[in-house]
């Protein structure tokens, strides 16, 4: 589910950053509290401040899902340094699973709209196309931006009702080698569930990638 908020006047952020959001006087609460961290899924050029999240049965998300238009929330930020490196001579490889796509969506929309020259390859893993937030939009950006390529990866296509012509399985060293053959050249960014991020770090280390060239952001408890 994506949620759009009015951006405060003069408020700026860098693609890839996040915010802390607090619900003000919510009608219900629970032990997880009234504050959540969300990556900013929108790009700076877009009119609204967008966050997107998997919906769980918690008080915070029930309130978020049902609160009326024009409800006010408290936003702190922008926070974080999970942003695209400035050296365009080094490619960027994004490794994302599930709703970990949100900071990458911000970076990729910004790159397309500003004409960034950075070479970017996105590996986007999900169980099924039905589970893949922003998939069609990210594919369309790839049709427009010659410096960007998306590699969609599905792990449970036997449970899908949609056709799929992309990769099937898991992101591994062999797959990285097919689409990023000079594996030591890029800067790598990985975001998603903690187990996925840990697995990607291990895969990159086994492939010989310097740990200084790997940047990560865990999405725990979303």
Image (cartoon, helix red, strand yellow):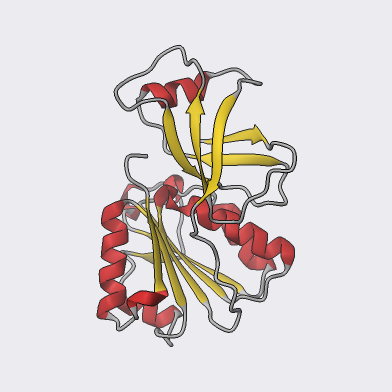
Residue 53, placed above or below residue 149: above
Residue 7, placed above or below residue 138: above
| Residue plotted at (68% across, 71% down) | 116
| Marker count (numbered) | 0
| Residue plotted at (43% across, 31% down) | 35
Residue 222, position as x, y percentages in the image: 37, 39
Residue 115, position as x, y percentages in the image: 72, 69
Question: In the image, 113: left or right of 133?
Answer: right
| Residue plotted at (61% across, 20% down) | 71
Kindly indicate the quadrant of the structure image that contains residue 141: bottom right
Residue 193, placed above or below residue 52: below
Residue 96, position as x, y percentages in the image: 42, 59
Q: Nearer the viewer, residue 63 or 7?
A: 7
Q: Is residue 41 visible?
A: yes
Q: Which residue is outermost to the bottom?
A: 182
| Residue plotted at (46% across, 64% down) | 165
Q: Nearer the viewer, residue 120 or 217?
A: 217
Q: Which residue is outermost to the top?
A: 27
Q: Is residue 153 visible?
A: no
Q: Nearer the viewer, residue 216 or 115?
A: 216
Residue 31, position as x, y percentages in the image: 29, 23
């Amino acid at each position: 589910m994506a949620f759009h908020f009015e951006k405060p006047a003069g408020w700026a952020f860098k693609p890839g950053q996040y915010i802390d959001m607090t619900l003000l006087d919510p009608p219900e609460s629970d032990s997880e509290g009234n504050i959540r961290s969300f990556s900013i899924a929108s790009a700076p050029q877009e009119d609204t401040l967008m966050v997107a999240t998997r919906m769980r049965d918690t008080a915070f998300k029930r309130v978020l899902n049902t609160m009326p238009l024009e409800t006010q929330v408290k936003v702190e930020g922008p926070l974080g340094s999970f942003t695209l490196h400035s050296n365009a001579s080094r490619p960027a490889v994004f490794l994302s699973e599930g709703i970990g796509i949100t900071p990458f969506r911000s970076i990729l929309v910004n790159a397309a709209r500003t004409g960034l020259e950075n070479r970017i390859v996105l590996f986007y893993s999900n169980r099924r196309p039905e589970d893949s937030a922003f998939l069609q939009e990210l594919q369309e950006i790839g049709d427009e931006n010659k410096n960007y390529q998306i590699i969609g990866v599905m792990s449970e296509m036997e449970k899908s009702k949609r056709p799929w012509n992309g990769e099937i399985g898991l992101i591994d060293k062999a797959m990285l080698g097919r689409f990023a053959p000079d594996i030591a050249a890029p800067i790598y960014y990985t975001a998603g569930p903690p187990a996925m991020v840990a697995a990607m770090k291990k895969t990159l280390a086994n492939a010989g990638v310097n740990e200084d060239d790997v940047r990560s952001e865990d999405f725990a408890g979303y």
